[in-house]
């Protein structure tokens, strides 16, 4: 399900781009997708320098390895972007980590890391780069959310919370930037076949829904850029549980409690 809006954008949307979380998973797939389209001068950010350099070589991009939760790391990254590729026409924020288990058993350090990586790092980077886009009168910010933020997922309370916050941030920022020519897209995938689940310490064990390839999410990111979409679910049918929850929260909670 895709929701369009009226923000103006260039007919041929090419230029400079920053992709965070690009060392693997969705971010790496987005970098490769943009490279395949051609005409993009990219800076890729990620925490794993070795993997990031490999992806950058594949995408003919420049790598800037950094943990965006570190002090002044957002400033250093954005200064690097402006110096190497100029004002960004596109920012795709993919950086994220997960944690699975009962909330009451979640260590404080894990809570802090998840909120810092999945939410605060993105806010800080957007805060620094959005004014440059607005000044130029064009650009697009793409935020990678999760269906967990739309419906809440058992065993992922904090992850659900930060992804919900990211979705509301996307809406609020879109309203603020509407008159500037800068668009904001919120891409909302379900389960994606990436190392995310291995790194969080708990594998994905459900038989349904089946994980989608990260390239499918990257295709959705490109559609949101090319068509100026506000909101894209991947796969599209995932909009249904989100809509049911919005229209009938009690019914949704009863179904979620029964079927997980």
Image: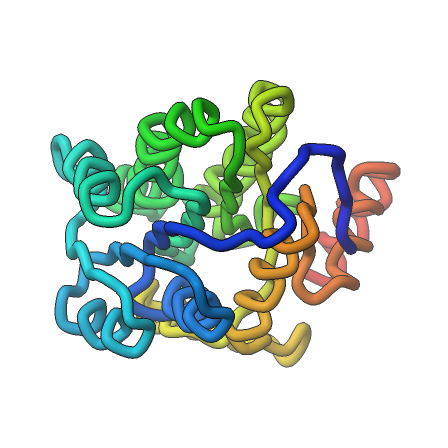
What's the residue at 79%, 63% (across, down)?
A: 237
Q: Quadrant of the N terminus?
A: bottom right
The percent position of residue 14, horizontal first and vertical second, equals 49, 54
Q: How is the image coloured?
A: rainbow
Judge by depth and name the residue closer to the eye, 206 or 11: 11
Q: Quadrant of the C terminus?
A: bottom right
What's the residue at 52%, 74% (across, down)?
A: 215
Q: Is residue 180 above or below residue 182?
A: above
What's the residue at 29%, 38% (across, down)?
A: 116
Using residue 192 as the reference point, say whether residue 220 is left or right of it.
Answer: right
What's the residue at 20%, 42% (across, down)?
A: 77
Q: How many marks?
A: 0
The percent position of residue 180, horizontal first and vertical second, equals 57, 23
The reply to whether residue 147 is visible in this rendering is no
Using residue 246 as the reference point, say whether residue 198 is left or right of it.
Answer: left
Q: Is residue 230 above or below residue 216?
A: above
């Amino acid at each position: 399900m895709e929701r369009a809006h009226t923000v103006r954008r260039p007919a041929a949307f090419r230029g400079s781009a920053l992709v965070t979380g690009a060392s693997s998973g969705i971010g790496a797939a987005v970098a490769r997708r943009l490279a395949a389209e051609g005409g993009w001068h990219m800076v890729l950010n990620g925490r794993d320098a070795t993997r990031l350099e490999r992806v950058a070589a594949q995408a003919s991009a420049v790598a800037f390895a950094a943990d965006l939760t570190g002090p002044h790391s957002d400033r250093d990254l954005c200064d690097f972007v402006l110096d190497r590729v100029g004002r960004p026409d596109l920012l795709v924020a993919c950086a994220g980590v997960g944690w699975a288990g009962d909330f009451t058993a979640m260590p404080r350090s894990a809570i802090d890391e998840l909120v810092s990586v999945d939410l605060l790092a993105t806010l800080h980077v957007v805060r620094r780069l959005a004014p440059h886009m607005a000044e130029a009168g064009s650009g697009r910010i793409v935020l990678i959310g999760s269906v967990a933020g739309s419906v809440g997922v058992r065993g992922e309370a904090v992850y659900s919370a930060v992804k919900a916050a990211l979705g509301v941030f996307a809406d609020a920022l879109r309203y603020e930037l509407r008159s500037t020519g800068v668009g904001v897209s919120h891409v909302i995938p379900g389960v994606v076949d990436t190392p995310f689940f291995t790194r969080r310490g708990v594998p994905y064990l459900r038989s349904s829904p089946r994980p989608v390839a990260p390239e499918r999410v990257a295709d959705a990111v490109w559609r949101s850029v090319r068509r100026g979409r506000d909101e894209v679910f991947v796969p599209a049918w995932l909009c249904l549980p989100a809509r049911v929850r919005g229209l009938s929260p009690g019914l949704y909670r009863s179904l979620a409690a029964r079927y997980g």
